[in-house]
Amino acid sequence: MNAPRRSSPPLRSPEQRRGDPATTAPRRSSPPQLSFGQPVLQLRGIVKSFGANHVLRGIDLEVARHEVVALIGASGSGKSTLLKTANLLERIDDGQILLAGDDISDPRVDVDGVRARIGVVFQHYNLFPHLSVLDNVTLGLRKVRRLARADAERRGMTLLERIGLAAQARAYPDRLSGGQQQRVAIARAIAPDPELLLLDEITSALDPQLVGEVLDLVAELKGAGSTILMATHEIGFARRVADRIVFLHGGRICEQGPPGQVLDAPQHPQTQEFLRRVLR
Ligand SMILES: Nc1ncnc2c1ncn2[C@@H]1O[C@H](COP(=O)(O)OP(=O)(O)O)[C@@H](O)[C@H]1O
Ligand SMILES: [Mg+2]
């Protein structure tokens, strides 16, 4: 929250970007400069079982400010469970979770207060169907941040302009394509300016031709300095946008490192096997 945001070009929609020589977000030519100091998220020895199903067997993971970490792993490897523990949607059996140094795994924690600091987008764009696009984006600002409607709507419109959907502000979600709805879900998640964004397979329910516009938006959020922990099955996207790839297997972090290392020269046989399957 305190660190200055990197200055960055405003977010533009695919529609606005049409005609650009490069339609993908620019790659920084030098490695990202991660700020030092306290990580935004620290998972320490996270253990989580569902009955006899030991899903997380001791996960240690830190996400630095402005860092984008991609979780990959087979279906059922615990990616969603890990994201849910970070947002307190699943209680952990053991371990500790720190958000900007605050122990949010303490049972006495104010859960709503914690969730107000974390933006979440799931696989299925869960916009409220009976609310307009603008109301979906501003609801959290009004109810959680307690902004007056006019202030919330001003911020909401700015966000919708950033994602190129200002013209749809008064429309209901069912008038939008799946890709547009998912972009609205992202706008809603970033509206309160959260310290951390959790993205769980946000393109997996989309038709293939709509995936690009959502992934481009995530790349632009990274450019704007967001801190992101995301589960993704889009290996090409993880390569393009993640600073670090974390491969989950058997309830543990099997291997992690920069995309070029984990994806091009995986060290662990399980990583090699997984990548052979998904890149086939
Ligand atoms: N609420 C739940 N109750 C019981 N089992 C669950 C629950 N959520 C997830 N699981 C189980 O935990 C394992 C990991 O699931 P999940 O975190 O969804 O994996 P991934 O997101 O990597 O596909 C799976 O075996 C799944 O069936
Ligand atoms: Mg999942």
Image: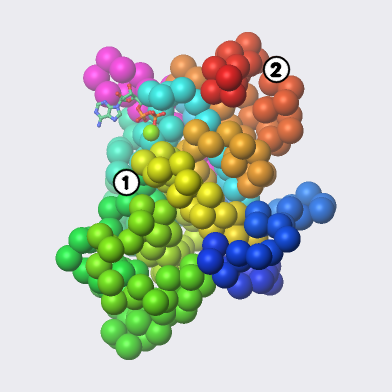
CB of mark 1 near ligand 2 (< 8 Å): no
Ligand 2 falls in which quarter? top left
Q: Is residue 67 magenta?
A: no
Circle 2 sits in a helix, a strand or a loop, which is it?
loop
Q: Farthest left residue?
A: 130
Asked if one can make out residue 72 in the rendered structure from this viewpoint, the answer is yes
> Does residue 170 lie above or below 251 as drawn?
below
Q: Which residue is mark 1?
A: 124
> Residue 278 location, x and y as percent?
54, 23
Q: Which residue is mark 2?
A: 267
Q: Is residue 45 magenta?
A: yes
Asked if one can make out residue 222 in the rendered structure from this viewpoint, the answer is no
Badge 1: residue crowd in 10 Å (few <14, some 14–19, many ≥20): some
| Rendered residue at 36%/47% (across/down) | 122
Circle 1 sits in a helix, a strand or a loop, which is it?
loop
Q: Is residue 259 left or right of residue 30?
A: left
Quarter assignment of residue 170: bottom left
Q: Is residue 2 left or right of residue 209?
A: right
Type of amino acid under label 2: Gln
> Residue 95 location, x and y as percent?
43, 33
Overall secondary structure of the magenta stretch? strand
Asked if disc 1 and disc 2 are in contact, CB closer than 8 Å, the reply is no
Q: In the image, which is nearer the foreground, mark 1 or mark 2?
A: 1
> Does residue 149 lie above or below 140 as drawn?
below
| Rendered residue at 53%/49% (across/down) | 212
The span picked out in magenta is 42-57
Locate the C terminus and report the quarter of the image it occupies.
Answer: top right
